[in-house]
Image (spheres, helix red, strand yellow):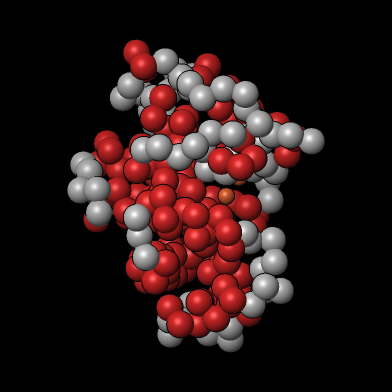
Amino acid sequence: MSLHLGRTQFGNPANTGNVLTYDQADELFHAWVLNPKLKIHMQQVACLMKCWAAEKEMLDEAGQWKWEMAGLLHDADWDQWPDLHCKKIIEELEQRNIDPEIIRAIASHGHLHFGVEPETNMDKMLYAFDELSGLIHAYSLMRPGGYIDMDVKGVKKRLKEKSFAANVSRDDINDACERAGIQLEELIAFIIPRQSAVTATLQN
Ligand SMILES: [Fe+2]
Ligand SMILES: [Fe+2]
């Protein structure tokens, strides 16, 4: 079964700047995503996107929310409609006249699956965070202290163990770092403390 979207243009440029409110995005998130593990993954990626937008892209709050929204909704249809991933969420956001930049980032988060190349910084970072965030979370779950004292070296070790979180594509992670022009170590070091902090709030 192919998830190829068969197109590379998304949304309408006239909708640039249109976003969901936080409450609207939250409502869609909870209505479509029922699996608690997937919810955590999407919230973690949302946080990383927001942090990157604020700290590295120096975007204002509106800009940060666009990045966060892309992270929060990137797997929205994966839980209930895996055969339609990520066609369904794209169409939903297009119907709601959402900013094409956000829709494009979602459409390119798995370029081998969807046939859409990551082009913008938002595209590239969503792609880069997606798999690595999942592997780091899996690592936290096998550590007695969770995220406490987790370091880059430990994560790199797990990356080298092919059997660990075997569904996480190492090729995608390396490819994503190359495209984003980031060292793997730098990306891991960015993720650990931020993902640790947001995960603590999600589990409380
Ligand atoms: Fe996905
Ligand atoms: Fe994901």
Relative side of 141 to 55, left or right: right
Q: Position of residue 125 (x, y in %)?
A: 41, 49
The answer to which of 203 and 182 lies nearer the viewer is 182
Is 131 located above or below residue 32 in the figure?
Answer: below
- Residue at horizontal 29 percent and vertical 48 percent from the top: 53
Identify which residue is drawn at 59% across, 34% down.
115
Foreground: 68 or 85? 85
Relative depth, front residue between 145 and 190: 190
Q: Vertically, is 142 above or below 67?
A: below
Residue that appears at 52% across and 59% down: 173
The quarter of the rendering in which ligand 1 is drawn is top right
Can I make out residue 47 in this image?
A: no
Q: Residue 68 at x, y = what percent?
A: 40, 44
Rendering quarter of residue 48: bottom left
Which quadrant does the N terminus fall into?
top right
**Image-quadrant location for residue 101:** top left
Query: Farthest right residue?
Result: 1
Any part of residue 17 in sight: yes
Percent position of residue 132, x then y: 52, 62
